[in-house]
Amino acid sequence: MQLENSYFLNRQTLFLVFFSLIYFSLSLPAGYAGFNIDASWHEALVMAIDKGFVFGRDFIFNYGPLGYLNTGLLPKSVSIWVLVAAEILTLVNYLIIIKLCFQKSPKNFWLVAIAALVIFMPWGFISDTSFTFFYFFIFWLLYAKQTHNSGALILAIVLSVLIFYIKVNLSIIVYGLFWLSLCYFWWAKAFTLRTLIFCLFCQILLTYVFSILLHVDVPAYLGASLKIIDAYQDAMATMLLSSKDLAVLLVFEGLIVLVVLLFALRTFSWLFKNHFFGLYLYVLIALAWFLGFKQAHTAVGAYNIFGFFLLMPPLATLIYLFSENQEKLWAGRMFVVVLCLQLVATQIIRYYVGEKTFKGYVLTYPPDAIANDIKEKGFEFDHILQIIAGKNPVNYLNRLVSYQYDDNFKDSPVVLPVDLKSKIGNASVDIVPHQISHIYFNQLNYNPRPVIQSYQANSDWLMKKNGEKYVSTTAPAIVLFRIDPFREQNPFWVETDLTESLLRNYQLTDTCVIQQDSFAVFQKNKVLKKITSSKISTIKAKLNEEIPIPQSSSPIRFSADIQYSVKGKLSRLLFQPPYLYCSVTYENGKQENFRVIDKILKGGVFINQKVITHAELSNFFVNKGVDNQRVTKIRFWSNQASGFEQSFDGQFNEIKIME
């Protein structure tokens, strides 16, 4: 028996070492800057950290000052060893969970080993670091309750604080969950009141210390995050999959839920034993499932739903680990079924991504560079050797010793025109709406509005914050501005307060072309112009009712308070909000439809002039839009009309800038 146990432990240890080597083979300790809409905020984040911006005041976004733990792009002032430490922390949590699974199922070594590799390795586990840490946080709460181990609570505290400074919106849920868990642990007599109070004190103290070290105004940080959370779904919800493709994936999601529910019903009586520990477990699982579902189904696309499916087997693992031992056989079967459903669903998603061809499906597996080479030249045996060469722990060590921050700028994907770069010099600069990479790669003096990308400034409060920046004493000297539509929206019906501030505090002095995109160049005035806003009229209107637009040579700002109905609020909570549109009729008789964000509309949009192109933008700022097409009427509508209250109030205000 002793020999058998020794054999099992040696085999287990060898696997954990093997797992660790695979882990370091599939990752790198740091990445280099990219060039797309997401890469732009990665780069904004590192510039904000290096410049000592205060998060919550100078920088308002989903991610906080430790957001680089998720992106992998390091600030210049941060050592690569910080990322290494985060990756080791992640690995240690993996190994502990796998080891506990071995202990729970000592006779199924190969099943546990293969499942661990399938879950954690080829698929990337959970791609978002904040969600990965959230998963570990849930694990340690459950482990603390089951074992009465106060060390598990300390680990949960550390993870919660890291999440707080990685992604603040998720952390609000994490902190609330931790505090409620402390109350539950006290009621269940899992820990003494003294221990729980000490843990609460440690979390608050650690949060405070980090706020000083990381330059975070915690009240402002939380307040801004609540505003972003409230408006995020309305502006960011979009459907990138066909209804048929989505329906197939929803079937698999439903099957996974059904399998877990059937197991929960089988163990129903256990839910209420041991101070309702089973119920506590399922509440945590359901919350994590729901958060993952909402994150994946805001922008309903293949990769987002892929990430959601990756979360399912790990959650099933927690049910397996913390269920009663007498139910471990059925818990194991439940886990295997969930894993198989996930594997089939993720292969279907790969098939979608591969343009529904077998070749395209296969090419979703190699790295992008190799896949593109195969597409151009055809498959060669050398491609296999390249994949093997690219997937080993030596690459991790090579990056660790060779990483240099300045290498981000070796092969710049964007170079500014010489005359523009000369004009900017060392002056502070911002760019609208989101192409922050232009500033980063040219190493300009970045001085952004707080909500750094316009698609995130999707409410009256967030727009106002950006407008205030541009008329403040810290306003950037130069602003690069581009008309760029986002998800069916009118490109000029965003950042309304910022537009007003440009009219007051800036002069359009030039136009430049960057990467074939036209930008207007604004320079700050020496004197801030005064502004008057005069109410023209208020209206009471209904959806699908045509609203005439008052005529004026000055810009007219229109605001309206269109509310979701009860049905719309439920749809917004459980899946996606209904989409609101505005049909715009111009004086030449032509019509266009734009998606409208209710919270932006509440703050107001410039309604009476057509500003869709770069030429129309220039004319608006230089000639007050004299030659722009006038809007004669508008009509709000929705394909889900029952999702909105039918009546609403609106107001027209004429804006005049005093020269």
Image (cartoon, grey):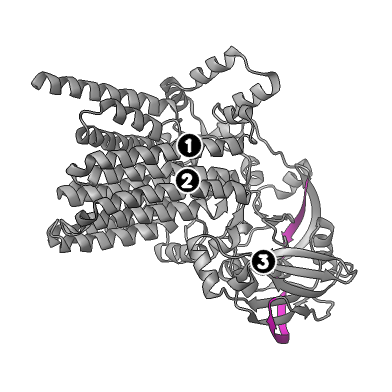
Whether residue 154 appears in this view of the structure is no
Query: Residue 59 placed where, x, y %?
Result: 52, 57
In the image, taking residue 564 as reference, residue 133 lies left or right, namely: left
- Type of secondary structure dominating the magenta stretch: strand
Residue 252, disc:
2
Query: Residue 393 placed where, x, y %?
Result: 41, 22
Tell me the quadrant of the picture where the N terminus can be found: top left
Of 83 and 406, the residue lying toward us: 83
Q: Amino acid at mark 2?
A: Phe
539 inside magenta stretch:
yes
- Residue furthest to the left: 2
Of 594 and 229, the residue lying toward us: 594
Tell me the quadrant of the picture where the C terminus can be found: bottom right
Residue that label 3 marks:
639
Whether the residues at callouts 1 and 2 have beta carbons within 8 Å, the answer is yes
* Badge 1 density bin: few <14, some 14–19, many ≥20, Cα 10 Å: few
Whether residue 504 appears in this view of the structure is yes
The residue depicted at 47 percent of the width and 26 percent of the height is 399
Query: Residue 229 placed where, x, y %?
Result: 49, 62
The residue depicted at 45 percent of the width and 67 percent of the height is 223
- Give the residues in magenta: 517-543
* Badge 2 density bin: few <14, some 14–19, many ≥20, Cα 10 Å: some
* Badge 3 density bin: few <14, some 14–19, many ≥20, Cα 10 Å: few
Q: CA distance from mark 1 to mark 2?
A: 9 Å
Of 27 and 201, the residue lying toward us: 27
Residue that label 1 marks:
344
